[in-house]
Amino acid sequence: MAGTKGLLLIYLVYVCCFKSMVCSSFSPLDGFFIDCGGNRTLKLEDGRVFEPDYGNADVGFSPTSHVVVLETDMDSSNESNDLGVYNSARVFTVASNYTFSTKEIGHHWLRLHFYPVENPHYNLTNAVFSVVSDGIRLLHEFSYSKFGKSSRLLKEYIIDVGASSLKDLVLTLSPVNGSVAFINGIEVVSVPNGLFGSKVIPVPLGTAVDMPTNVAFEMAYRINMGGPLLTPKNDTLWRTWEPDKPYLANPAAAHNVSANPGVIEYSAGVLAEAAPKWVYATAQEMANANVTDQKFNISWFFEVDQNFTYLVRFHFCDIVSVAPHSLIFNVYINNQSALNSFDISTKTMELSAAYFIDFLVNASVGSNQMLVQIGPSVLRNFPPNAILNGLEIIKISNPSDSLDGDFHAISIYPKSLKIKKWMPLAILSCLGSFALLLICLAVFFLCLHRSKKPKHQPSAWLSLPTQIGVSETKISTGSFASTAQSLGLGRILAFLEIREATNNFDESLVLGVGGFGKVYRGVLDNGVVVAVKRGNPRSQQGLTEFKTEIEMLSKLRHRHLVSLIGYCGELNEMILVYEFMASGPLRKHLYDSNLPPLTWKQRLEICIGAAKGLHYLHTGAAESIIHRDVKTTNILLDENLNAKVADFGLSKSGPTLEQTHVSTAVKGSFGYLDPEYFRRQQLTEKSDVYSFGVVLMEVLCARPAINPALPREQVNLAEWAMCWQKRGRLDQIMDPHLMGSANVESLRKFGETAEKCLAEQGVERPTMGDVLWNLEYALQLQETSIQTVADENSANYIPDIPDWSPQIEPADGDDAGTISNKESDAATSSLFSQLMDPKGR
Ligand SMILES: *[C@@H]1O[C@H](CO)[C@@H](O)[C@H](O)[C@H]1NC(C)=O
Ligand SMILES: *[C@@H]1O[C@H](CO)[C@@H](O)[C@H](O)[C@H]1NC(C)=O
Ligand SMILES: *[C@@H]1O[C@H](CO)[C@@H](O)[C@H](O)[C@H]1NC(C)=O
Ligand SMILES: *[C@@H]1O[C@H](CO)[C@@H](O)[C@H](O)[C@H]1NC(C)=O
Ligand SMILES: *[C@@H]1O[C@H](CO)[C@@H](O)[C@H](O)[C@H]1NC(C)=O
């Protein structure tokens, strides 16, 4: 019930957010367009209307100025020409202000237009001047002679006007020693609320930090990857987006792609003003993206100022994939990982949906060039490709409130407070007492915590040996576990590490939500991709499951069981960190997704893997363990589709030698529950066998164990499939994708195995070892495509003890093709009766 309520709430919040987002289509409250020195209204095609500065009620400026006008008016005939603003300039001989009475608090775009108009009075090319706004130095001793060319220049800034109370925006132009200052045009436009997110991710990767406040920004680059130049005509906010060609390091590596802009959607939380659809509708992807073995990055170089920190915004929109979750790639800034195995679909939930993400980059780490790269993920199983749709590189003012000039300190990360001269002392003393208080509190809680916890409580990260599996993602957990231990800070470091690995539990990294809590994808600082399961701290049941899972997985190690990399029991946290299973749960590959259907052989191999895991659980460890929650969502697949059993939160130690069963309250998942266990509340390994039988049927029929939408007799897969199996016509309800490719005998063997698993009485069901053997046999039948099996040879197939590791050799007499089906049935059923014989085991 609580779950449904939660869902409803989430839905309501979502609807509200979405509605408000849709309704508030942006029209800037503040919009000043000033043609400095002009004497008529200038209407541009893109909708902007520039008014002369002189006699303008909204704008104040010092009268000690002169107007210069281009002698040969470029386009006096064409009023709408956007070059009009460059025809005149206002020239100042002393420091002077422009004052704009803004109506809105917050970020404003400030666009300054410069052009050294040729005129008989002043040599503007040699003019040297500085520009300051809102206490931020925008230009320091700027001169066209230093700039190099006398072309039109547009400088674009973002200024925070009156962080708390409304105030005027003041722009000050100060000529340097006897020179003059000039300006041709000024725009002041409100930035839509929400265009700046609240969090940014630092590179090199760390925990997301707050978007710096009390700073000004300067637009350094705004790039439309793989697309044409977008002018203010194409952007409702009059921005310009350049093509990326001039910045591409290796043009041959990139290939431009485009989609119809009409299909682009803005995903929840992404304003339509983030970037025009034209930006998202084009991208650069990897050239020859169909070559499977390609391994290279697409690289762009951008000139930056080494002394500054930059905000780098990546715009993504998957316009190249045919299905979600099939494009996974890496993003680097200055050779540092920014996004590792990034999947746009996890953020947008659909294709052709716009998404952007911000990073904070300290340029001094690199050089005066910023290197931006995208490249394929190392995760196999995904076609190597990578895309980028748009990029914005934004300079952040340094701690000395400058956006220009190397005359001040290098900023590490932008300060969050503007520190006035008298403030350091006050802050220091405040901080001092605060720190003291914190220490006292920490000591207090630590003591409280210690005394409450029983001694056997896990104290730090569990350092487990690495798995011995075949998985490509085999990893060493030694490095971080041992640093944690050697520092003697296991707990604290561990939690910080998890928080960083998951971008502070970024909602967008959520892989799934289960009864226990949310599962996030994370990247540890050694680059290892992990799945992080964070329990709900207030759930008492969760605590039991948390402990069970750690206890179970500490005892267990098998290549068909998901490995626990570590856990964190700090304070109220219950966090489990597992190896990342790139291909997700088996269920997703069977139905209700866009993933390609699995072949019969793949399905058999997956079932065999899962059966090996369960067989090991039942027999491999010192005491038998009953999983109790076997289902297709608890069988996970790695990037090579190797199956591993997961989720041991409900597991129980099996009956000991004296007992035949364990009495317990019934737990598990509807649709997979052993009816005998349900009736008698007695748990044996055979309950897992029953659930596994349901899994087998699900794999064969590609439908859920319970589907309430179907006619009543079909709702429960186990019952429905058994009806057909008993009539020998399981093929009637099997997944149509298997038609033709699956071997009939293999299917028959599989059906029989599932049938035995689903037997009403536990004692009638085979052990997992038997199930395994039968599945391997079904795989053998599929691989060798033997149509029938000779009765006299059948003995060769049956080892004394079902042995699940060696390959089963095909019969030596390969003359089998002539034997009739009847005989083969007899053979397999006699085989089964032998397997069922309890005295064997
Ligand atoms: C201002 O108006 C005069 C005549 O009306 C014209 O000659 C001059 O070029 C105008 N100046 C500008 C900047 O357009
Ligand atoms: C896209 O690529 C084609 C062929 O290489 C080229 O002709 C075209 O100009 C490119 N488009 C853009 C916008 O760069
Ligand atoms: C941008 O606007 C101009 C003028 O309206 C138009 O010709 C051009 O096709 C537009 N470009 C795009 C990519 O929409
Ligand atoms: C891509 O660039 C990153 C960072 O510069 C580098 O570590 C990685 O090896 C590159 N990948 C390929 C496939 O070249
Ligand atoms: C990135 O790596 C390349 C090759 O290793 C090197 O030439 C370049 O200087 C590095 N760039 C930065 C910004 O570290």
Image (tube, rainbow, N blue to C red):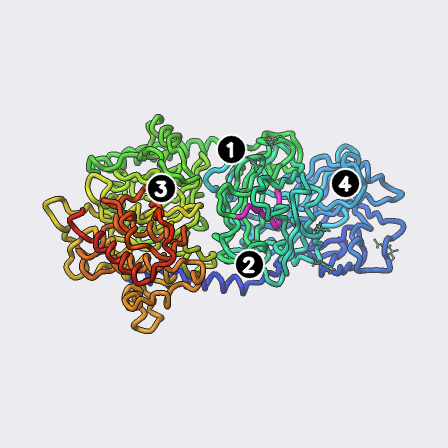
Residue 38 on image: x %, y %? 80, 54
Q: Nearer the viewer, mark 4 or mark 3?
A: 3
Dot 1 alpha-carbon crowd within 10 angstroms: few under 14, some 14 to 19, many 20 or more = few
Query: In the rendered structure, are the residues bearing label 2 and label 4 in contact, judged by CB atoms less than 8 Å apart?
Result: no
Q: Is mark 4 within 8 Å of ligand 1?
A: no
The residues bearing labels 4 and 3 have C-alpha atoms spaced at a distance of 61 Å
Q: Which mark is residue 266?
A: 2
Image quarter of the N terminus: bottom left
Disc 3 and disc 2: Cα gap in Å? 33 Å
Residue at 39% across / 32% down in the picture?
Answer: 480
Q: 10 Å neighbourhood of mark 3: few (<14), some, or many (≥20)?
A: many
Residue 577 numbered mark, or none: 3
Whether residue 537 is visible to the viewer of this picture, yes or no, is: no
Q: Is mark 2 within 8 Å of ligand 3?
A: no
- Please name the residue shown 69% across and 58% down the image: 234
Q: Which residue is tagged 1?
A: 422
Name the mark on residue 181.
4
Q: Residues within 10 Å of mark 4 (few under 14, many from 20)?
A: many
Task: Determine whether, in the image, residue 601 is placed left or right of residue 803.
Answer: right
Question: Distance of mark 3 from mark 1, alpha carbons?
Answer: 47 Å
In the figure, 818 relative to 377: above or below? below
Say which element carries label 2.
strand
Instruction: Find the magenta span and give its range.
Output: 383-394
For marks 3 and 1, the one nearer the N-term is 1
| Mark 3 C-beta closer than 8 Å to ligand 4 | no
Separation of residues labelled 2 and 1 (CA atoms): 46 Å
Q: In which quadrant of this rendering is ligand 5 seen? A: top right
Residue occupying the point 33% across, 45% down: 808
Q: Element type at marker 1?
A: loop
Label 4 or label 1, whichever comes before in sequence order = 4
Question: What x and y, as percent, mark residue 284?
Answer: 63, 48
